């Protein structure tokens, strides 16, 4: 049995080790064991859960690969339609198509015998070939009327076929008429050239040349000299390769053609014509423009149907004041005559280029005595005291219209129209070829540029 003293001492030691809050803050006994709590693990995964997890992962990546990636590629890809770049460059370089105008000239030999007609045709063709120095524009002769004996070209490689006088492909009909003198007469309202000759000018079978053949060739060359110069200037000023350009034109000819090109409008399938009457007072308030257009302008516009279409409107403006003052207009005042601030002149109707033709009522005149002038790429102006007779004004406007659309200045109207058709065709061909070359070079220079299907289909 323990004594009270011993028990008290042990109790006191126990209290000291326990500390203030009853926790033993002393050192643990050497034989003490620390208890580590055991974590509870997740339950074992079922096979069905593993299959579901695998299915979800596979589905996710399947959607990414087979739906998301194609959609991303389709929405961000740059579409480039396939273009025939080699063919386009061939057009631009003149290898695919070279503008050549072999004009067919039909000759009606009249009363000449078949052999005499063949000899004359052969000698005239030789003379034309000797005079021609521009391969893109040459004349080819053929006999008109009933079938004739086949005639070979100078190179004896092809037959010159007979042609009908009404054949649309014939540029000019030459009629040989016997007479007392030699002269050439160009018909004003038909593409016909009458050649009057004397009997001793007909070539024989033994002669390689004849005065009549030389005379015919010289006249044909003079008739088509302006057209040849226009096509030569067009080729020289285009972006065509040097080997396709003709030899240099005479300086004065090139200068005249340059002025004409800056004066005329660019080609358009449709032009809009506005005929305006401007008067500084209240009279006249009416004019017989409809009848004047029907009689003097419509026939000319109908002849242009193969080249361009035309729409027409008219207007009358009262109390219209000009932009200049004085009874005599100097040449430097002409540019300010049109009062653009007050005169209702529309720049375009329906997107078509507009040509304005103005009649101004007044007594003014241009320095030098003229009462009309042409405004390049815009229209024409006429000053006259009244509108009692519109025929002179319509004839002047007809000449202005021909100049503004780029028609030749010489020859008869039928030949001017046929020349304009060929010149416009050559211009459109060169422009299209240049556009194809520019598009091909742009496609090669910018690989990231988009090329829609409309470009390839067009």
Image: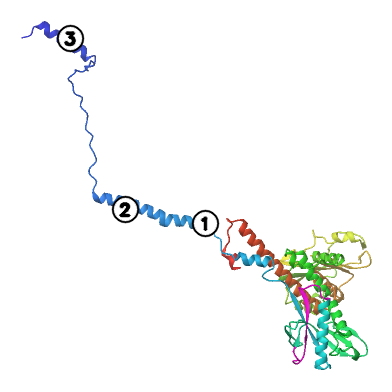
Range of residues picked out in magenta: 131-150
Task: Residue 213 in the image: state x and y as whole percent.
Answer: 86, 84
Mark in the foreground, 1 or 3:
1
The Cα–Cα distance between marks 2 and 1, rounded to whole angstroms, is: 31 Å
Q: Residue furthest top?
A: 5
Any mark on residue 12, and which?
3
Task: Residue 249 in the image: state x and y as whole percent.
Answer: 83, 67
Q: Which of marks 1 and 3 is nearer the N terminus?
A: 3
Front residue (pair 398, 338): 398
Q: Mark 1 points at which residue?
A: 77
Magenta-colored stretch includes residue 140: yes
- Relative to 427, residue 207 above or below: below
- Relative to 37, residue 427 above or below: below
Instruction: For residue 77, say whether it is visible.
Output: yes
Any mark on residue 214, and which?
none
Q: Which residue lies furthest to the right in this view?
A: 368
């Amino acid at each position: 049995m323990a004594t009270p003293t011993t028990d008290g001492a042990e109790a006191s030691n126990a209290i000291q080790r326990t500390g203030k809050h009853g926790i033993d803050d002393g050192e643990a006994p050497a034989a003490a064991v620390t208890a580590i709590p055991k974590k509870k693990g997740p339950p074992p995964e079922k096979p069905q859960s593993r299959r579901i997890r695998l299915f979800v992962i596979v589905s996710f990546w399947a959607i990414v690969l087979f739906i998301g990636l194609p959609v991303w590629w389709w929405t961000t890809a740059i579409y480039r339609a396939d273009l025939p770049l080699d063919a386009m460059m061939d057009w631009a370089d003149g290898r695919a198509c070279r503008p050549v105008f072999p004009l067919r000239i039909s000759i009606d030999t009249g009363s000449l015998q078949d052999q005499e007609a063949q000899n004359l045709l052969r000698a005239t063709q030789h003379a034309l070939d000797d005079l021609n120095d521009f391969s893109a524009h040459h004349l080819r002769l053929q006999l008109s009327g009933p079938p004739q004996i086949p005639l070979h070209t100078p190179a004896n490689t092809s037959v010159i076929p007979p042609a009908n006088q009404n054949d649309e492909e014939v540029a000019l009909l030459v009629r040989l008429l016997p007479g007392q003198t030699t002269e050439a007469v160009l018909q004003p309202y038909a593409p016909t050239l009458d050649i009057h000759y004397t009997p001793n000018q007909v070539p024989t079978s033994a002669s390689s040349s004849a005065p009549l053949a030389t005379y015919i060739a010289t006249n044909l060359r003079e008739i088509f000299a302006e057209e040849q110069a226009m096509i030569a200037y067009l080729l020289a000023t285009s972006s065509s390769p040097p080997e396709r350009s003709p030899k240099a034109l005479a300086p004065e000819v090139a200068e005249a053609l340059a002025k004409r090109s800056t004066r005329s409008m660019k080609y358009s399938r449709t032009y809009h014509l506005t005929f305006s009457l401007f008067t500084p007072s209240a009279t006249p308030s009416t004019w017989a423009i409809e009848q004047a257009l029907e009689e003097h302008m419509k026939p000319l516009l109908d002849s242009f149907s193969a080249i361009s279409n035309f729409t027409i409107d008219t207007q009358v403006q009262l109390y219209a004041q000009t932009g200049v003052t004085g009874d005599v207009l100097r040449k430097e005042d002409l540019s300010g005559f049109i009062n653009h601030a007050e005169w209702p002149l529309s720049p375009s109707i329906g997107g078509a280029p507009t040509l304005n033709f103005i009649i101004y009522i007044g007594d003014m005149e241009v320095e030098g005595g003229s009462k009309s002038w042409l405004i390049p790429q815009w229209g024409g102006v006429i000053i006259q005291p009244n509108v009692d007779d519109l025929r002179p004004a319509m004839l002047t406007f007809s000449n202005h219209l021909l100049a503004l659309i780029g028609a030749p200045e010489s020859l008869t109207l039928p030949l001017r129209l046929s020349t304009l058709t060929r010149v416009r065709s050559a211009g459109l061909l060169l422009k299209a070829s240049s556009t194809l070359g520019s598009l091909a070079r742009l496609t090669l220079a910018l690989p990231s540029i988009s090329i829609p299907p409309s470009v390839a289909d067009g």
